[in-house]
Amino acid sequence: MAAPVAIVAGAGSISNAWFPPLQAEKVKVAAVVDIRRDAAEAQIEKYGLRGAKASDSLPATLRDTRADFLVDLTIPEAHCKVVCAGLRAGLHVIGEKPMAASMAEARKMVRTSEQTGKLYMVSQSRRWNRLHDRIARTVSKGALGTVSTLNCDFFLAAHFGGFRDAMESPLILDMAIHHFDLARMLCGKDPAAVYAREFNPKGSWYKGDVAANCIFEMTDNVFFAYRGSWCSEGCHTSWNGNWRIIGDRGTLVYDNDAEPRGEVLAGKKGFIRPHKPLKVVKSPLKHDTMRGALREMLVFLRGGGVPQSECHDNIKSLAMVFGAIESSRKGRRVPVRAL
């Protein structure tokens, strides 16, 4: 098979995480598009993208450039327009998270994928982390028995400056999508309802609510409890959060990006039953983050299976984000609806 050909839309800072994997996987970049043509030209020069055209017009580039897929690295507010344009031009699309800036836009993107027969995949990068893959495989294997509970704590003091400081829901909108999607991946269940409360703690340098407590009801009577803050000074968790997954045969703990560990039942007698160490399975993943996502797209292009974060699946994680915000603003439990 000839080397796959891509058009990259968006030449901002996130593109620096994508051009190296594209080159490592021998993808030919035919064009780089950005509203600032000079930014596109700069990235072409920086990465030595021979033959790549710089453009500030996506419609013209889609019309005039032969490619197999589009890489959407634009801002979330532009995702719907860019992705739908790529799909309608006959290209498959892989794009940055979050899928869209609203559920209405996300549903439009799913419909466009269906109408065009082209695949749209969201790069939910933490899915391609070997430790996360090991945890998901261990749980799906039944090592903990029937899982009933997932807990995630995420606490950092992030002094970004810029647009996040002015957002209404910076934690839930900009960060929690990673943890919500991880919860779905790790337990293999989907959201059904949520009760959430966002708030802005004393001493916060954010304008909007930058902390939240959420209780998600997942399918098969699994509960996911999330506590998070982006303005919590001291004793930080990792960016992936600290996790506890509980089943009827044992518990798995994953803290500060250390090796996951756990204990499972080793006997049926005693006030406190005896336990033994949990065996966490190995992962076959060879590459993580963006390269891992890209490899799944390339496998699909070569006739392989549908990537795990294809739009019909990833919209469920986005629905958790907007469900939590809706619940907080209404002050009550709300159903989580994706499609």
Image (cartoon, rainbow, N blue to C red):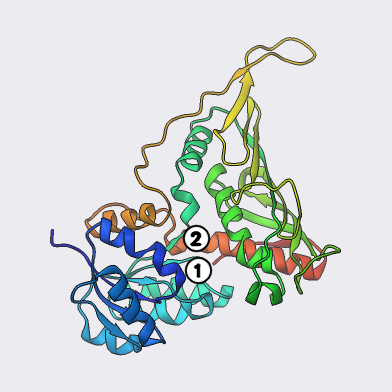
- Tell me: residue 280, above or below residue 150: above
Looking at this view, name the residue that lies furthest to the right: 202
Contact (Cβ within 8 Å) of mark 2 with mark 1: yes
- Tell me: residue 73, above or below residue 225: below
What is the quadrant of the N terminus in the image? bottom left
Within 10 Å of disc 2 (Cα), the crowding (few <14, some 14-19, many 20+) is many
Task: Residue 314: give its label.
Answer: 2
What is the quadrant of the C terminus in the image? bottom right
Disc 2/disc 1 C-alpha distance (Å):
8 Å
| Residue 220 located left or right of residue 62 | right
Residue lying at 34% horizontally and 89% vertically, measured from the top left: 57
Q: Nearer the viewer, residue 55 or 326?
A: 55
Task: Residue 41: give its label.
Answer: none
Q: Position of residue 122 (x, y in %)?
A: 44, 63
* Amino acid type indicated by mark 1: Met
Badge 1 element: loop
Q: Position of residue 171 (x, y in %)?
A: 68, 63
Within 10 Å of disc 1 (Cα), the crowding (few <14, some 14-19, many 20+) is many
For label 1, the residue is: 99
Give the number of marks: 2
Residue lying at 57% horizontally and 64% vertically, measured from the top left: 318
